[in-house]
Image (cartoon, helix red, strand yellow):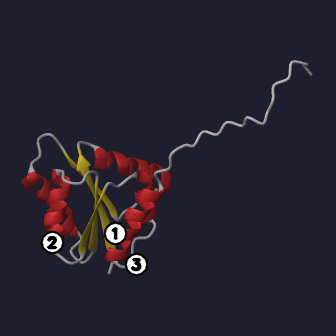
Amino acid sequence: MKQIIIITGHNNFASGILSSLTMIAGTKDNVYAVDFLNDDNDNSLEEKFNKIIEDNKDKEILFACDLMGGTPFKVASKLAFSNNTYEVVTGINLGGLIDTSMKLDKMSIKELKTSCKDASIKSVIPLEKVINNDEKETSEGI
């Protein structure tokens, strides 16, 4: 079965991260952005999701949310509980999204969800500053 990703999050998170994905990995016809704006509520957000779902009736859906517990997560989760071909992952970042967008249609939707989580976690890497104390300064010049 074919798959799509619906990115969702507060304010312009979804459209912003999709813009970055497009810049780095090119246009993805199977990835959608749904922003949860100030004027939105649970019902209007669900309507936005349903427009995309209606156009993709025969596809599995991975909802990629910005934040656990927020309205985008709650509405996506409600839809996922009503359909076994929908899955949700939250805490998405650009590294995880790039990796996941390249794996669409290559594994089950449940495996894709897990892969997305793993790729997002692996893409968070703290910079380790290393100071080399072995180099000694000399005052002798050249």
Residue 38, numbered circle = none
Residue to which mark 3 is pinned: 107
Find the distance from the CA under tag 1 to the CA under tag 2.
15 Å
The answer to the question of whether label 3 and label 2 lie on touching residues, with beta carbons closer than 8 A, is: no
Residue 61 visible to the viewer: yes
Which residue is found at the position 32% from the left and 75% from the top? 110
Residue to which mark 2 is pinned: 81
Which residue is found at the position 81% from the left and 29% from the top? 136
The answer to the question of whether label 1 and label 2 lie on touching residues, with beta carbons closer than 8 A, is: no
Whichever of labels 1 and 3 marks the residue nearer the N terminus, that label is: 3
Q: How crowded is mark 3: few (under 14 residues within 10 Å), some or many (20 or more)?
A: few
Whichever of labels 3 and 2 marks the residue nearer the N terminus, that label is: 2
Q: Position of residue 40 (x, y in %)?
A: 11, 46
Quarter of the view holding residue 50: bottom left
Tag count in the figure?
3
> Callout 1, which amino acid?
Lys
Q: Position of residue 86 (x, y in %)?
A: 23, 72
> Callout 3, which amino acid?
Met
As helix, strand or loop, the secondary structure at mark 2 comes to helix
Q: Pick the quarter of the image with the C terminus.
A: top right
Find the distance from the CA under tag 1 to the CA under tag 3.
10 Å
Q: How crowded is mark 1: few (under 14 residues within 10 Å), some or many (20 or more)?
A: many
Q: Which residue lies furthest to the left in this view?
A: 43
> Callout 2, which amino acid?
Phe
As helix, strand or loop, the secondary structure at mark 3 comes to loop
Quarter of the view holding residue 85: bottom left
Residue to which mark 1 is pinned: 113
As helix, strand or loop, the secondary structure at mark 1 comes to helix
